[in-house]
Structures are given as C-alpha cells and as structure tokens.
Amino acid sequence: MTDAAMPLAGPAPAKSLHQPDARTRKRNAAERRFRLYGMAAVSAGLVALVVLLTSILSQGLPAFQQTYIEAEIYLDPAILDPNGTRDPEEISKVLTFSYKPMIEDSLTSVAERLQGQGASELTPAMLAGMISGAANAQLRDYVLANPEEIGQTVEFEFLTNARIDQYMKGKVTRESAALDSKVDVAQLNAADALVEGGAMETRFNWDFITAPDASENRPEAAGLGVALLGSLYMMLIVLFLALPIGVAASIYLEEFAKKNVWTDIIEVNISNLAAVPSIVFGILGLAIFINWMHLPNSAPIVGGLVLTLMTLPTIIIATRASLKAVPPSIRDAALGVGASKMQAVFHHVLPLAAPGILTGTIIGLAQALGETAPLLLIGMVAFVRDYPDAPPGGLFEPATGLPVQVYNFTQRADPAFVERASGAIIVLLVFLVVMNLIAIILRRRFERRW
Amino acid sequence: MKATNLISLAVAGILAAGAAAAQSRDQIQVAGSSTVLPYASIVAEAFGENFDFPTPVVESGGSSAGLKKFCEGVGLNTIDIANASRKIREKEVAACAENGVTEIIEVRIGYDGIVFASQIDGPAFTEFTPDQWYKAMAAEVPVDGKMVANPAKTWADVDASLPAVEIQAFIPGTKHGTREVFEEKVLLAGCEESGALEAIQATGLDEKAAEKACMAVRTDGASVDIDGDYTETLARIDANPNGVGVFGLAFYENNTDKLKVATMGGVAPSTETIASGEYPVSRPLFFYVKKAHLAEVPGLKEFASFFVSDAVAGPNGPLANYGLVSDPELADTQAMIADEKSM
C-alpha cells in the first residue's frame, strides 16, 4: 500500500477552487432553493397572520366606539318619586317602562331645536326610534345612583340603537336601510341633522370593556365586563392550583422518584394527558365537580378547576424540562458541601429552573384563557348579566369567559354583533400577547446558560 | 412550608365558601333551545332591570340537551327552567319522573315561523310550495312504480316557474329542532300534496316507511346540512348567490337588507300570517318549569309570569318586536302559571 500506487477516485480538478465545478454548483443551487422554500414558508405564515389581523382589526375596532345622542332631560319627580320621599327603595319601584315618556319629552326638545336650525323633517317620534332599548335602564341606574338630582334638568347621553350606530360607522348605507325593516332612510337623514346640530357624536366606549352582556335587542349596549371578570377568576384559580401542584409533582418525579416502571408509566400518561382534547376535561368536570361534588353550574370555580386539570400536564412537562436543564454539577456541589437533597433542590436547582417554569406556566395559562370547549359542558357558555362578587364568594357565582363571549356574539342574529365579536377577539388577543410578552421578558432576564 | 400552609388554607376557605354557595342560590338558571335563547335573554335582561331579583342565567345548547339537564333531578345544583323549540317527549317525561322531577309546568310562549330566503340580489326565488321543496330535496322519488335517485339538478327541473339555477339548499342539521319541523311541515306535506306518498306506497312500502322515504333528504351535495346556527346559513348564502336557506322569522327580520324571503304556498311569512295559521311552516316555543323549585328559588314564579305577561310576550311587547309570533291564548297560559298547574 503505497501512496503512489493508489489510483485517484476521479480525474484531478482541472480548475481552481474559485471556479466552482458542476457538482459544487449543483450543491449551491440546492442550498439556494432550500433558502427560497424557507422564505416562502415564512412569508406564507406572515401573509396569513396579516390577513387575519387586518380582518379582525378592521371589523373589531369600531366596537370600541359608540354613538350617543346628548339631550337635556328633566327628571320629573311626579313620575320618579310621587310621594316625595327620595327614598331609594321607593324610587327603585319605578320600572324602566315609566322612564320612556321622560325620554320622549327630552327628545322632543332636541327635535324642536334642530327644526329651528332647518332640519324640518325631523320629528320627535323619529328620534325616539333611534334610541337604544337600554336607555331606559341606563337612566334608571343613573337616577338610583343620584336620587338628589330628581326634579332637576340634567345632561344625559343616550345610546343610539345599533342601526344608527352602524350608519355612523359606515356599515349601514341608504341602500341597505331602504331594504331594512328595522330602520328607515328618514332616520338616517335625521342622524345627519343631529350630527350637524352637535347633538350626536361617536366616541370611545368604555362600556364595551366594562358593561355586562346585553340581549339581542340591544347589541349597542353589550360589553365584556362579566366575561373579563370570569376569565380573570379562572386564571387566578388555575395559577394558584396548577402551579404548586405541577411544580411539586415535577420536582418529585425529576429529583426524588426512583426511575422504574411506575415512573415511566406516569411519564407516558402525563404526555398523553397534554394531548387529550379539552372537551374531555369538560366532561370530567361535569361529572366530578358538578354532579358529584355539587358545585354550582356556570361558576368560575368549576371552570378554573377544569382548566387546572387541562393545564397541569403542560406545566409538569415544562417544569421537568427546565429542572433537567440545570446541570448536575450544581446538585453535586450542593450535596458535596453537606446540603440535604431537599436543600439542594429548593436552594439551588429550583431558583435556576424558575424562569423556565414560569414561562411554561404562562404559556399554559394563555392556552387555558383561550379555551371554550370545556366551559360549554359546565354551563359557562351562557347569557350572564350580573357581575360576580369579589373572591372567594364570587368564584361560585355565574360568569362567562372571554372566548365564550366571542362565541356567544357570533351566534346572534343582529349584524351589529359581528363587530362586537371581533372586538372581543381583539381584547382576547391583547391579553394573550401581554401574557406571552411577560413570558419572554422573564426568560430573557433570568435565564442562565451553561 | 409557609407557602404550602397558605395554599391549603386558601383551598379550605374556598371549599367552605363553596359549600355555603351550593346551599343557597339567588339567580334562576335556564338552559335549552338556541331558538328560544334570544327571547329568554331579552326577558332575563328586562327581569333583572325591573325586579329586585338577580338577572337569570340563560344557557343555550339545544332543546334536547336542555331537557336532559332539566331532568337530572330536583335540587339547587340543577337548572330551574328548560327552553324547548318543541314539546317535551314522553321519553323525557319518563326520564324526569325517574329522577324525581314529577311536576313540570309547561309554558307556551308563542310561535316561531320558519322562512325560506335567498340572497337579495340572487335569482328570483319568490314563491315556493311544499311539493317543490319535496321534489328538490327528496333522496329518491317514485318514477313509474320504482324508487330512483332524485334526477332534479336545477330548480327549473322541479317546476318550470322557478329559476333555472342549480339546486343549492342550506337546511338545518339533524340536531336542530327546526329540522323536524322542516321535514314534517314541508317535505312530508309536499310529498302528500304531490301524490308522491301514494306512489311510494304503491311501490310496496307500508305507510310508515313511505313517510320516512318522503322525509329522506338527498345527500348528493344539492342539500347542505348546517349544524351551526343561522349566522352560518347566512354566510353560506352570502358566498353562494344561487343558494336558498332555511331561517327563523326573527333572524330574517333582523337581516332584511341581505335576504329576500319567498312565500310558501302563496302566503308570505309574517307575524300575522303565522298567528292566523295561514303560513304553514311554524311551530310553538315552550319553556318548562320545575314546580318543586318555585318555593326554593327566589323570583322563579315572578320570572315565569313576567315572561308571558302581556307587556313582554304580547303583540306589542319586546319579544314580538324581535320576531316572536305572540300566542292568541296567552291569557290561559298566564292563568296556568298563576295556579302553578303542572302537566
């Protein structure tokens, strides 16, 4: 075996390395193609995201604005407090129906003022048809909160009904109104006259975020208040239950348990549970928490418990991974200077694994926040108008959740609910983005690499 | 260790509060039909505004699901009212009785019309008859004494007066109560009207099997089952100019700028024609109340009577405004609730 006798595998390279031969060109071309595929995949994803976001934002942003008619209203003591006692209990006996004539009177004065300014075809009846059905209740709430103002004339902002509001936002046109049984073109002209006269404006609407849901007759009054509270309560429950249980389980499995058939079985089961469809947890929740433990229907406590079960595997898997990532030298060093196993884990390993654990928890929470299916079975997909109390009592009172509210809005007949559904999605997305940002920041700030 | 103590304390506190909460319940709980849901939520909202009781919680999920929940038993962790877009079935009454729900008050709130509508700028679907729908939708039709697969491809194949466009119907899926009404009042009626029922029986089927054949809907793509709600049907119609959809009257009335409704058997659907019974495709809507809960849940009786009061369910009330056809016999229903008369 001498080098000289060894025949070369192929012909010697004829050119220098600076001039690629056919095979090199082929390999380079393959690499360029692969990069193109990668870029195409990324841009396809980006295009999908942009399309999704633009459609949601363009449909949903108008939900944060609402149209109001401003009018002066005389709070007639003869109607509101016939006995003159100013006793809140007496006043609350006046039903919303009785507020209607007062509102109509107040609109008459607006109509007369605008008629004087040249809007001759504007009639009080036309204006009354433009006011939301929720106006009576809003006025009643105002009077109950401020009984001392009975007998005075106050400035009040009435919600307009959904069709007028949609007209101001450009969704209802004169052509569609001509075909629409719920609005007529004369009312749209009246709306224009009101805007010109300064009595009507469209502006930011906090009520969309804070107010409770409203029935199908009043899309303009519907808000996310109860859903936000319900989601918040459920997230609190998940955080306080899933984090300690998940971390304790992972520490035991990772640091203390002997590796044998049983831990293998548990490990496989946990990975399996993470992939179980969420509706299965809903069925479990119905059977255990409601039918067996007799917890109330539609309550955040049940929703929180179900979502805890759903989130636990995610947290356990993330925690175990971050415990594994802590180098054994840390444990060895701690044990070497005489720390007990528990001290080594709690004083040295756990703090180093904390960023990973928190990231996993927040991602698990975000997943739980967007979940609707398990809530369907435990009665949280519902029409709920009363805010739940503060915890712990409020955990047992009916509430909904943000994704549930999106689902509810999309099912309703009135087209004005379309923008509210998209608006609710925007609020949900903002929550998710904030949670994921926190996860990224935690990881960036506290992560250590070895 | 402190953290664990705190957590166990918190869990114990929550469970104690839960035990207390499970004992008493303030708000009424309602579940059931998605058709009745809008009406129930309108009433619940007005009830919460005007009475000292909290606003009832209204769940949807379908008539059958609601009645199943209703029949789970008596007690504060079960629902008080089930909404239904059909009458309660014998089987369900028996299931209820088995679980101790023996006294049920049946309340009819009014009627709901089912309308046939298409895109407002689409082909001229303005007049339908039940037999046209039967001929367009049937899976198999009798031809010369034999059952053959439905040959109709366009509406003009069914009836020359209809537009010559492909048959594309969006009908409620089988889980909906509306489907039952559609099958019985449109397909079966059309089958009888056109004489197809006799022709099918002539092929050797008994009456029951023949009726079943009348109500079997074709599965070759001309008819699409919509398992979601009417908003999904509307989206399909929006995307498909030749499509015809089945909607509730209330839904149509909220979307008259997008949909064009057709007459059925020469009668235009409206609250008046449905109340008078002229318009053929309508059905009563119900809710069922557990009598045993009347004394336990505060406001339950008030809610039931408020629901059917003239101011709410009458011809000028908010429910009629939304699309409910008010019941001419409302006074009887009111009296029945006042007397707590069970079925």
Image (cartoon, rainbow, N blue to C red):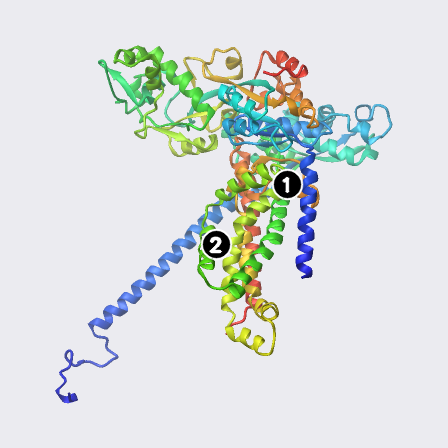
Mark 2 and mark 1 lie on one chain; the one further toward the N terminus is: 1
Q: Residue at x 53, y 56 (%)?
A: A315
Tell me, yes or no, if residue B129 can be seen here.
Answer: no
- From the viewer's perspective, is A123 left or right of A41? right
How many numbered dots are placed on residues in this image? 2
Relative to B113, say whether A338 is above or below.
Answer: below
The crowding category of the residue bearing disc 1, from other C-alpha atoms within 10 Å (few below 14, some 14 to 19, many at least 20), is many
- From the viewer's perspective, is B203 left or right of A204? left
The crowding category of the residue bearing disc 2, from other C-alpha atoms within 10 Å (few below 14, some 14 to 19, many at least 20), is some
Q: Which mark is residue A226?
A: 1
- From the viewer's perspective, is B9 left or right of A346? right
Relative to A380, say whether B341 is above or below.
Answer: above
- Mark 2 residue type: Ile
Helix, strand or loop under label 1: helix
Percent coordinates x, y for residue B242 in the rendering: 36, 28
- Mark 1 residue type: Val
User: Do discs 2 and 1 belong to a common subunit?
Assistant: yes
Front in this rendered view, residue A263 or B258: A263
Percent coordinates x, y for residue A382 in the rendering: 58, 35
Front in this rendered view, residue B241 or B183: B183
Give the foreground label among 2 and 1.
Answer: 2
Q: List the residue tagged with mark 2.
A: A270
Q: How far apart are marks 2 and 1 (CA)?
A: 34 Å
